[in-house]
Image: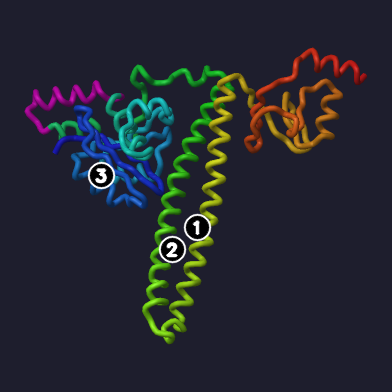
Amino acid sequence: MEPVIVGVDPGSTSAVAAVDFQGDIKLLESGKNFPPRDIISEIVEAGKPVMVTSDKGETPSKVRKIAASVGAREFVPEKDLSKDRKKELGQGSNSHERDASAAAMHAFKTHRSGIEEINALSQDMDSDRANVAKKYFKPSENVMQDGQEEENSESEEGGKNPFKRKAERLEEKVDRLQDELEEKEESLEFKEQQRRDLQSKYDKLKSGKTEDILKNTKVEKLENKIENKDNKIDKLQERLNKALLREKQYKKAVEEIQEGGKIVPLVEETSPGEEPFVTHSKELRDRMRSKGKEVYHVNEAEGIELGERFVLTEFEDGEDIIKRYRSSR
């Protein structure tokens, strides 16, 4: 069997990808409640795993256990793969498959020189490439750190503008919300199908049986189940609507930040010690403004509210702050 590098995206919906030493994808699968034993079975059918990795800078325990189970080296990226990196390398029909395949391809490209050396050694020694690769990447200490990435690696993270970093974190939160939405939509569809099945059974009982069967407790139980399912569907729909609203707010916030908006604290009745900031308290606003501070009440601030933060799109002129401060003395 040919050696492969494996990428795993764990979670309630998991995905696994395997890349051979030519950079071709040999395995790409995902599923809800995808147990490790099934993931391992898919891996060993695709080839001989010599390295297992994920898209995280800290390996999830599920990925670590899979690496140990198949006797492969665990590879840890220097940091979480960026959204752009995963978009560049990932393939698949959903975000989980794209994350898994991007992780495998990132490991392949990071170790390209070592892979070329393995290919050369296997030819010179007339040996099985999988065995050479297994020895080359032997899991003695089991963990390989990402010492150097390909030329496209984002090594400038530390020097980025703080507002830009916050914008990127908001984008990552939008991605997580989209994943949650997918899971909630799947759950909602499953509950709705259960409700339809129960309704169908109930209708058949009610229309095709005698009066004695209609009095049977089974009918009453079915009605109760249908009512419970309806309640669960309503609750899921409400959660879905809230998640959609949050996603819309975060996307709008990212756009405002990219156009010059500013992320500031949103507090109740205590100053955060920095300005500008937005507050729910008119008394705190008036008290801080009398000291020449740039403070806004939430009802008068122009921007978007995000929990404990507020994205300001319009700011007070500095000269106006000084004039107000002088007039209050």
Residue flagged by tag 3: what amino acid is it? Val
Q: Is residue 242 above or below residue 209?
A: above
Q: Amino acid at mark 2?
A: Arg
Crowd class of label 3 (few under 14; some 14 to 19; many from 20; radius 10 Å): some
Q: Is residue 121 magenta?
A: yes
Q: Is residue 200 left or right of residue 221?
A: left
The CA distance from mark 1 to mark 2 is 9 Å
Residue 23 x, y percent position in the rendering: 23, 28
Instruction: Name the residue tied to disc 3.
Output: 70
Chief secondary structure of the magenta portion:
helix
Horizontal side of residue 144 vs 161, given as left or right: left
Tag 1 near tag 2, CB within 8 Å: yes
Q: Earlier in the sequence, mark 2 or mark 3?
A: 3
Position of residue 327 relative to residue 78, above or below, is above
- The answer to whether one can see residue 138 in this image is no
Which residue has dot 1 on it? 233
Magenta-colored span: 110-128
- Residue at image position (34%, 35%) is 98
> What's the residue at 32%, 50% (across, down)?
36
Residue 112 coordinates in the image, percent (x, y):
25, 23
Could you tell me which secondary element the residue under label 1 belongs to?
A: helix
Which quarter of the picture shows residue 279? Answer: top right
Nearer to me, 290 or 184: 184
Label 2 packing within 10 angstroms: few (<14), some (14-19), many (20+): many
Q: Measure the C-alpha gap from mark 3 to mark 1.
A: 41 Å
Q: Which residue is mark 2?
A: 195
**Mark 3 or 1 closer to N-term?**
3
At numbered mark 2, what does the secondary structure look like: helix, strand or loop?
helix
